[in-house]
Amino acid sequence: MKQFEINAHKRGNFTKAAVKQLRREGMVPCVLYGNETENIHFAVLEKDLKDLIYTPSSFIISINIDGKKSLCILHQTQFHPVSERVLHLDFLAIDPAKPITIQVPVSISGNSEGVRQGGKLQVLNRKLLISGFLKDLPDQLNIDVTDLTLGKTITAGDLKYDNIRIMSPRGTIICMVKMTRASTSATAATAEETEEKPAES
């Protein structure tokens, strides 16, 4: 999985005034916790977070806090309800020697049978929760829909990959081919042709 590097500075003043001052300076207050370590409060330049926040990709994050590096994943993002600026970030420390649970995007490939029959492919979940060791984590989960027919779905329980586990509920629907008027008409026409075809003697 791709890594994203962030330079940060530790902070020790947690008053509302201090937080407001940080944001005026273009900084975002953050906290790093987990992996049996003490919580570390720090601040990051908001502009340095753009490619981490506003992307469908997932990353293993390397945070350099005043010269000390830590590996982590982005756990939670708080946005301003009106301006949608990033207000606060929570990072979860990870241990490369232990399985990591993280959401990764799905990538749909193939021209499904159902779409060729006039149906419409709908992607209902663009990310799935997986677990695996750092060295085995993929950038994305590739899903081939070539054999997906009209009215059928692909769920999390249908997927299997080497060295990782799908942690999302098995019934989570990733994609489906929805019936449309065109596909209904085509199905009906095919049925009529079958009925009208004379039986072979």
Image: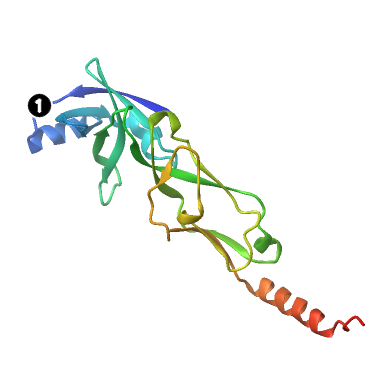
Residue 101 position, x and y percent, is: 34, 40
Residue lying at the far top of the rendered structure: 67
Residue lying at the far right of the rendered structure: 201
The residue positioned 61% from the left and 54% from the top of the image is 145
Question: Toward the viewer: 197 or 113?
Answer: 197
Which quadrant holds residue 132? top left
* Any part of residue 1 in sight: no
Q: Is residue 47 left or right of residue 10?
A: right
Quarter of the figure that contains the C terminus: bottom right
Q: Is residue 197 left or right of residue 61?
A: right
Q: Rate crowding at label 1 as few (under 14), some (14 to 19) or many (20 or more) other CA atoms within 10 Å.
A: few
Residue 15 position, x and y percent, is: 7, 35
Q: Which residue is mark 1?
A: 12
Color theme of the render: rainbow
Q: In the rendered view, tell whether residue 34 sits above or below residue 105.
A: above
Residue 134 position, x and y percent, is: 39, 30
Total marks drawn?
1
Question: Toward the viewer: 53 or 67?
Answer: 67
Q: In the rendered view, tell whether residue 10 sits above or below residue 116.
A: above
The residue positioned 73% from the left and 74% from the top of the image is 186
Hey, what amino acid is under mark 1? Gly
Quarter of the figure that contains the N terminus: top left
Question: Toward the viewer: 80 or 152?
Answer: 152
Residue 84 position, x and y percent, is: 30, 46
SS of the residue at dot 1? loop
Residue lying at the far front of the rendered structure: 201
The residue positioned 90% from the left and 80% from the top of the image is 200
* Any part of residue 55 in sight: yes
Q: Is residue 19 left or right of residue 99?
A: left
